[in-house]
Image (cartoon, rainbow, N blue to C red):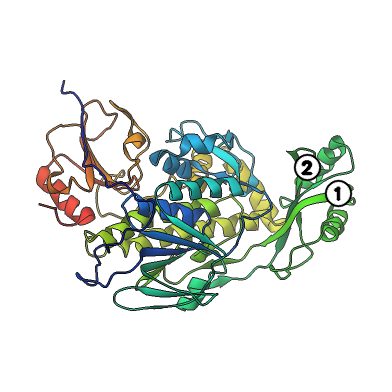
Amino acid sequence: MNSPQFTAEPSPSPSPSPSPSPSPSDADPHPHPVPYDVIIAGCGPTGAMLAAELRLHDVRVLVLEKETEPAPFVRIVGLHIRSLELMAMRGLLDRVLEHGRRRPAAGFFAGISKPAPEGLDSAHAYLLGIPHPVIVRLLEEHAVQLGAQVRRGCAVAGFEQDDEGVTVDLADGEQLRARYLVGCDGGRSAVRKLLGVGFPGEPSRTETLMGEMEVGVPQEEVAAKVAEIGETNKRFWLRPFGGGAYSVVVPAAGVADRAEPPTLQDFKQQLRAIAGTDFGVHSPRWLSRFGDATRLAERYRVGRVLLAGDAAHIHPPTGGQGLNLGVQDAFNLGWKLAAQIRGWAPEKLLDSYQTERRPVAENVLDNTRAQMELHSTEPGPQALRRLLTELMDIDEVNRRLIEKIAAIDIRYDFGDGPDLLGRRLRDIDVEQGHLYGLLHRGRGLLLDRTARLTVGGWSDRVDHLADPTAVLDVPCVLLRPDGHVAWIGDDQQDLDAHLSRWFGKPAN
């Protein structure tokens, strides 16, 4: 049997600061030097992940964050299966796992409690609960270690784009210049508003109060009341959080100005209205509110300005998909924008960011709309919830909903071909260990069980693993840097055509 061979071109070492020479431009082969290739507005999970992805390709990145300090409150967010896979692809998973708590991949859809289906198609089939500030810090540290620059207290006040780049105006009057600008600045995105991109959808009809605080009654009393009310009201809970604190979620009295944080008195009032007691809540650590507004940007790109994360889509937090959707946006966009800047992007590669990711967001918005209806206490939605709860006893129904929330059901439209084409490839075993361990550098990968193929003139962008022992049901696959299968087969000429489609013209 042939022994496995892994070939890869050395990647340029990311420099800790922008290099003085400009990168190639898609618009002008001899552009005027600019300090940055990409300016990213917003250093949340989406912005930090995008910065890191760009730095893997030696793109000069500046991240602007309007807040001077990270958010003072701590809320727990969940990393779903696909996001955990992305962390593994970039060598971040062990670092993330140190700070999180695993729980079964179950109970995501509208909070309907069913066991996790067996045999989910992933080596990372669990949910990881992790404090939001911690995942932001880890991703920002990763980006900075790769050479990204982060400036806090810098808000984007305006910008103008031309054929060569974007001039960004900061709130303090400073001007910056880059080839591209990406708005990762949240649901109230200044970049999206300045760009004039529509954000149609539905405004909030209901709001929910969320916070962490201590209670003044025994835990048994809290648990009994929560169990009683939770039978019909899925937007109500008090859960021990540790250190004597409870996570408290309760429906708000109405829709208020999101800019105005709720008070402890607001919580007391709503707890009494719904539970008949305020549980003696006191000593809040943080208080917030969220609504069920659902909106999707009409476009993800206008010229040299792009949108990602909550700047492109907002939806209720049910199912815990928001952070995951944004991180996955960044993973899709990063290598494509880098290819455009480095000068090897095929035509329309950058446009495929919107083509692929906007339908994914549409599907997430639809499933959160459905889940919010199932949270209603009205008789109709409650009847539908009971019916769906019964149907989820069917393994295939339960599995389909879990895969949808966990984002492992996504199949991009790459044309006709086997079902695997366009889907992400799980972290399979290969001779060198695990597949995802070969994707840390953000390059394409030809996984070749025939040991007869070559990546030829694309070796500066695509690695080659010749491994007849790889656990695959097909002879060979070409993976994009985001882990999606771009080609399946064993014919060199057909492979070359697909290498050109995704990775541009060969270097030689």
**Callout 2 amino acid:** Ala
Q: Quadrant of the N terminus?
A: top left
Give me the residue at 47% from left, 79% from top: 196
Residue contact between numbered discs 2 and 1, judged by CB atoms under 8 Å: no
Where does the image place residue 13, in percent across and percent down from the top left?
Answer: 30, 46
324 left or right, relative to 231: left
Question: Residue under circle 2?
Answer: 245
**Callout 1 amino acid:** Val
Residue count near mark 1 (Cα–Cα under 10 Å), binned few <14, some 14–19, many ≥20? many
Where does the image place residue 120, in percent across and percent down from the top left?
Answer: 46, 35
Depth order, front residue of 396/192: 192
Could you tell me if residue 349 is visible in this image?
A: no
Residue count near mark 2 (Cα–Cα under 10 Å), binned few <14, some 14–19, many ≥20? many
Could you tell me if residue 271 is visible in this image?
A: yes
181 left or right, relative to 366: left
Where does the image place residue 327, in percent across and percent down from the top left?
Answer: 47, 52
Mark sitting on residue 281: 1
